Amino acid sequence: MRLQILSDLHLETEAFDPEPAPDAEMLILAGDVDSSWAGLERFRGWPVPVIFIAGNHEFDGRELREVWPALRERCAALGLTMIERESIVREDAQGRRIRFVGTVRWCDFDLFGPARRDRSMRAAGYFVKIMRSTRDGVPFDPAAVREEALACREWLAAELAREEACDATVAITHYAPSFRSADPRYGAQPGTASFCNADDALLAHADLWIHGHLHCRHDYRVGNTRTTRVLCNARGHAFKGEADGYDGQLVVEV
């Protein structure tokens, strides 16, 4: 199946007009499309099916518990398939069954191990303040983010390990699954644990792992007996130069 991949478009501020790739069979939106949700309208009537995974900025200024049903309803009205801690199977033009396993995943701050968790969570204070989100009426702070992240990981690990009669598995998470996806501008700083998780042990269960969140592009392979391709096609912010050379027509085959 040929997948067009977009993420981190930030259409709430960025001037970018997404266009369908002519040879794609499906579009994957890996989060942070538009914090206002208005930009999701651009994908109404897209010529191929669209799978959407929420990013952290889809929660900006909102109550976490209220976002999920409201965002799901919005996507359904636009003809988009939103998945969160869900797995769906779709057939491609050749009749191959492709499983899509998706969750925002959040960050559990264990990227550098438990010994550095507290430091990573302190660094995350800056990012959660930008979100201005709540959970059950109180600030969605790093401790709450970690709770959500661990629930996501538990589901993700169980789902990926589950046997499914399919020809390939595609994992989609907004947060990156490995330090290998770290932004080279920042490297091993504590704040990087707000962008990447140490999910390397899960990679072997997928043929392709798509993520966003890092405002830089990645395309690498890991594994021995089963090779997993990890891909991020995040656009980012033009005023920071992150969108330079961005390929919004990128299509990969799985």
Image (spheres, helix red, strand yellow):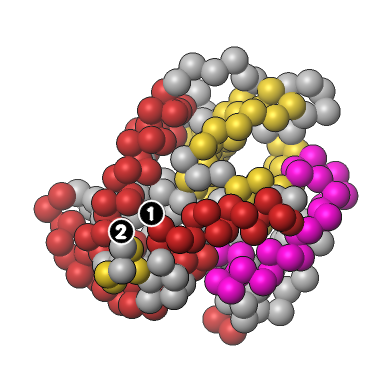
Residue 31 colored in magenta in the image: yes
The secondary structure type at the circle numbered 2 is helix
Answer few, some or many: residues within 10 Å of disc 1's Cα (few below 14, many 20 plus, some between 14 and 19).
many
**Residue farthest to the left, as pictured:** 115
Q: Position of residue 32 (x, y in %)?
A: 55, 64
Residue at coordinates 78% horizontally, 58% vertically from top-left? Answer: 44
Task: Tell me if residue 189 can be seen.
Answer: no
Looking at the rendering, the stretch of residues picked out in magenta corresponds to: 20-49
Q: Amino acid at mark 2?
A: Val
Q: Residue at x 49, y 16 (%)?
A: 163
Tell me which residue sits at (73%, 22%) in the image: 96
Whether residue 36 is in magenta: the answer is: yes
Name the side, left or right, on which 194 lies relative to 247: left
Q: Mark 1 vs mark 2: which is more N-terminal? A: 1
Counting the numbered discs, the total is 2
Q: Which residue is mark 2?
A: 145
Q: x, y percentage for residue 81?
A: 66, 46
Q: Main secondary structure of the magenta part?
A: loop
Q: Which percent across, then down, holds residue 16? A: 73, 73
Image point 33% across, 63% down: which residue? Answer: 135
- Left or right of 234 on screen, residue 60: left
Tell me if mark 2 has few (under 14), some (14-19) or many (20+) residues whose alpha carbon lies within 10 angstroms of its own. many
**Marks 2 and 1: in contact by CB < 8 Å?**
yes
Q: Which residue is mark 1?
A: 106
Which one is nearer the viewer's eye here, 105 or 78?
78
Give the amino acid at mark 1. Trp
Q: Is residue 169 left or right of residue 155?
A: right
Give residue 19's position: percent from left, percent from top: 81, 61
Q: Quadrant of the C terminus?
A: top right
How far separated are the C-alphas under marks 1 and 2?
Answer: 7 Å
Frontmost residue, 81 versus 149: 81
- SS type, badge 1: loop
